[in-house]
Image (cartoon, rainbow, N blue to C red):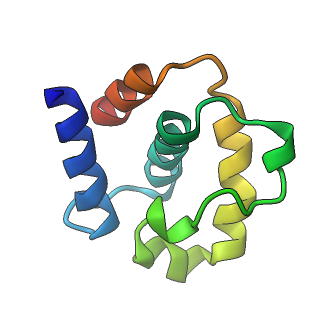
Amino acid sequence: MTVHQLYLQLRQDILESRIRCTEEQSLHVASLALQAEFGDYQVVKEFRNYFAAEHYVAQRLLRRTGTVYVKDKLPALHSRLRGISEAEAETRYIMV
């Protein structure tokens, strides 16, 4: 439970830009959050609409790169995490 609470707090801190990440780090942790929330990427989710970008990356990154860029990039990163459990995805998120 403590790990999950830490994950949620860090996720909120990143979204609210209290913790700043590089673009690469932001997209990586966002893909881990998708894995924790949705599990393995499914081909039917390829339409970029299975998540709201603003729930996974900070507004400053969305302003800089654009929502379309994030919606294109995250599914590819998410698909590489196949087989990772929710708990493992949250732990990796914390580690990053």
Q: Position of residue 29 (x, y in %)?
A: 44, 44
The residue lying toward the viewer, choosing from 44 and 58, is 44
- Count of all numbered marks drawn on residues in the image: 0
Q: Tell me which corner region of the image, top left, top right, bottom left or bottom right, holds residue 13.
A: bottom left
**In the rendered view, does 29 fall on the left or right side of 34?**
left
Report the front residue among 45 and 15.
45
Q: In front: 20, or 86?
A: 86
Q: Is residue 92 left or right of residue 78?
A: left
Q: Residue at x 49, y 38 (%)?
A: 32
The x and y percentages for residue 65 are 60, 74
Q: Quadrant of the C terminus?
A: top left
Q: Residue at x 51, y 50 (%)?
A: 24
Q: Is residue 95 above or below residue 54?
A: above
Establish if 4 lies above or below 66: above
Asked whether, in this view, residue 30 is left or right of residue 18, the answer is: right
Quadrant holding the N terminus: top left
Residue in view at x 66 percent, y 29 percent: 40
Q: Is residue 78 above or below residue 72?
A: above
Residue lying farthest left?
A: 2
Using the rendered view, name the quadrant where residue 59 is placed.
bottom left
Image position, residue 81 (x, y; %) = 62, 27
User: Residue 60: horizontal and vertical position, in percent?
Assistant: 42, 77
Residue at 64 percent across and 64 percent down: it is 70
